[in-house]
Image (tube, grey):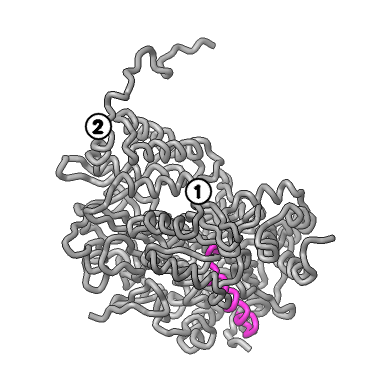
Amino acid sequence: MSFFTEENRTLADEIIGRYPKRRSAMIPLLHVAQGQAGWVSPEAMVEIADLVDTTPAEVLGTCSFYEMFKREPVGKYLVNVCVTMSCALAGATELMEHAEERLGVRAGGTTPDGMFTLASAECQAACTEAPCLQVNYRYRYRVDADGFDQLIDELASGSLDDEIPPHGITARVRQHIPVDRAVGALPPESVDEQPVWLAAPAGNGAGAA
Amino acid sequence: MASYTIPHAAGFVANDAPRIVTERFDHPDSYTLERYLATGGYDGLRAALERPPADVHGEVRDATLLGRGGAGFPAGVKWGFCPPGVWPRYLVVNGDESEPGTYKDRLLMELDPHQLIEGCLIACYAVGLSQCFLYIRGEMALAQERVAQALNDAYEAGWVGRNICGTDFSVDIVLHSGAGAYVVGEETALIESLEGNRGMPRLKPPYFPAAIGLYGQPTIVNNVETLANLPWIMRNGAAAFTAIGTPTSPGTRMIAVSGHVQRPGVYEITNGTTTFRDLIYGADYCRGTRPGRELKAFVPGGGSAPWFTPAQLDLPFEASEIGPQGSMLGSGAVMVMDDTTDIPAAALTLTKFYAHESCGKCVPCREGATWLERVLRRVCEGTGTPRDLDVLLEVGASISPGDFPHAAVPERGLEAKPFPYQMTTICFVGPSAFAPLHSALTLFPEEFEARVAANAHLDTELSGTAPSEVPVSV
């Protein structure tokens, strides 16, 4: 029994093929695994280790370093409330208190129905729109108590399903390099000459097809 | 005055100042290939491909394009550090923007991804970089989607990949999403992460990326905004670029101003000449503090930068003037605090950030940042003692020995302590953990003293010999 679906296994091979060394695909594959299950299970890590030619312990080592990878199930919606300086100056502490009260869990907790995980997050790069939060990495700006309640109601009712996919799926658009356009990734040790365009300047500026 | 917020670009405010990297933001479809091509898109690449790579490199060197990621090192000079004859060389794009207060790379990726792609191509052509890895912060879902779509469209149209524009210039650009780690914004940690490892910085020397980078090969690491300037420079020339701003800080740069101002926003400002007063009080910019409030302090260059007070308002965005005054321009983020701000609590929000984000590789940072947070939290909660304030400075000195940079405080006769700082850690995260707290303690000591005064009786009188004075027998 393999962890990855057939579709994701094909995707994994495509991703690995873009890198000069397979191990570079580790973080992208952890994202694929989390997209499939909503979290990163030991089974997923074992399979990724196999795909990138390393040990499960090495995959766990990388996985556990990064905030976004959850090694146990979280809610369908991960609500990350920013608590760093600009948001704190604009009332993030009060927003977090309200969020805890509304969801009935402390920061870090998941509601019993498995719908919401509430977390405090560090700067999300939306500092002028403080206080801000992300639901499964989709922004909500200048959130007050009423706005928060409305957001939770909408998420619970499913009316935001089109905009906000379940936890684990971040980008819904993936890069795809057409085979006939790809240059390809060679292992660095197999290349020892300068690129051809340095040797003979490209020089015709003919424009794209 | 022509200054207006752009609805589809939340946070961005446009005005009459010259615009280089945000010129397309006014169009609601600025991120599409159609709009890009209709507004001069890929003309910079075409211009570059008509010249020898060394010429293109020379043009960028002449433009004195300073890196926009934080360190402010000239990109053209950095490109020249690759050792000759060592191949392949790689380009790694640093889009892991996470510095508190900063967001400009996110907007550039969301709103004009083709401009970034074109910048990557120009850099690869000029320096002979045979593959490009575009590392985008994991939490930026929309930026990842927009860049992925732009890359797919650009590949399809022949702008990226094999035989670009029908020439023998060929390069792949690979989109790589991060997974949440501030320290990965440090270039050697970024490379570690790209190799599939925990994102911990490497020791420099020997691991200067231009010499020993990705897979041990020469690697150029450039910030998103830096690369986004290249198409304009290739279209208009270095002379047009240096005509904006000052000779040592030419062009424009994007600055996010947040906190207690009437109109927070991301602004593209003229480099070198715009002052903090212009930015915080100008009618075209933030329009001052809220009614009835006074400016108390501001962070001039992202969470890692020592703080300024109103005494430094007339300084311009010119690195050579900011360093001697005790801070840095960093990543282009100004955070404004008015007179309602609880200074120790504000400092704690940043100290907590660094304690959380320390990667754990260097002991002074891992332990020091954690203890700074714990002790400062105790002070903020009213259970700290006067001795705690000394402890904070002692712990800070274990991360960054010697006099830490700070701004002048004219009313107390305190002169500025210029940059740089010393550090006992591999990367800047360590000293950054100390910077906000050190500034707060230096500029507003009375706010800390007031918090701990009532607990003075709890400090035990220490007796005996200090550990450093105990004779060691070998």
Name which residue type carries label 1: Glu
Q: Is residue B399 inside the magenta stretch?
A: no
Numbered label tally: 2
Mark 1 closeness class: few <14, some 14–19, many ≥20 residues within 10 Å: many
Residue B173: image quadrant is bottom right
In the foreground, A202 or B191: B191
Name which residue type carries label 2: Ala
Quarter of the picture holding the N terminus of chain A:
bottom right
Disc 1 or disc 2, which is closer to the eye? 2
Q: Chain of mark 2?
A: B
The answer to whether A199 appears left or right of B123 in the picture is: right
Residue A148: image quadrant is bottom left
Q: Main secondary structure of the magenta part?
A: helix
Same chain shared by disc 1 and disc 2: yes
User: Compared with residue B432, is residue B455 higher up or lower down, i.e. above or below?
Assistant: above
Q: Secondary structure at mark 1?
A: helix
Q: Is residue B73 visible?
A: no
Quarter of the picture holding the C terminus of chain A:
bottom right
Residue that appears at 23% across and 69% down: B287
Pinpoint residue A201: horizontal percent, then vertical percent: 61, 76
User: Which label belongs to residue B453?
Assistant: 2
User: Which label belongs to residue B357?
Assistant: 1
In the foreground, B133 or B197: B197
Pinpoint residue B187: horizontal percent, then vertical percent: 53, 54
Residue that appears at 70% across and 51% down: A59
In the foreground, B164 or B354: B354
Pinpoint residue A25: horizontal percent, then vertical percent: 69, 60
Task: Give me the C-alpha separation between circle 1 and circle 2.
Answer: 31 Å
Residue span colored magenta: B136-159
Residue that appears at 46% across and 72% down: B108
Pinpoint residue B152: horizontal percent, then vertical percent: 63, 79
Q: Is residue B146 inside the magenta stretch?
A: yes
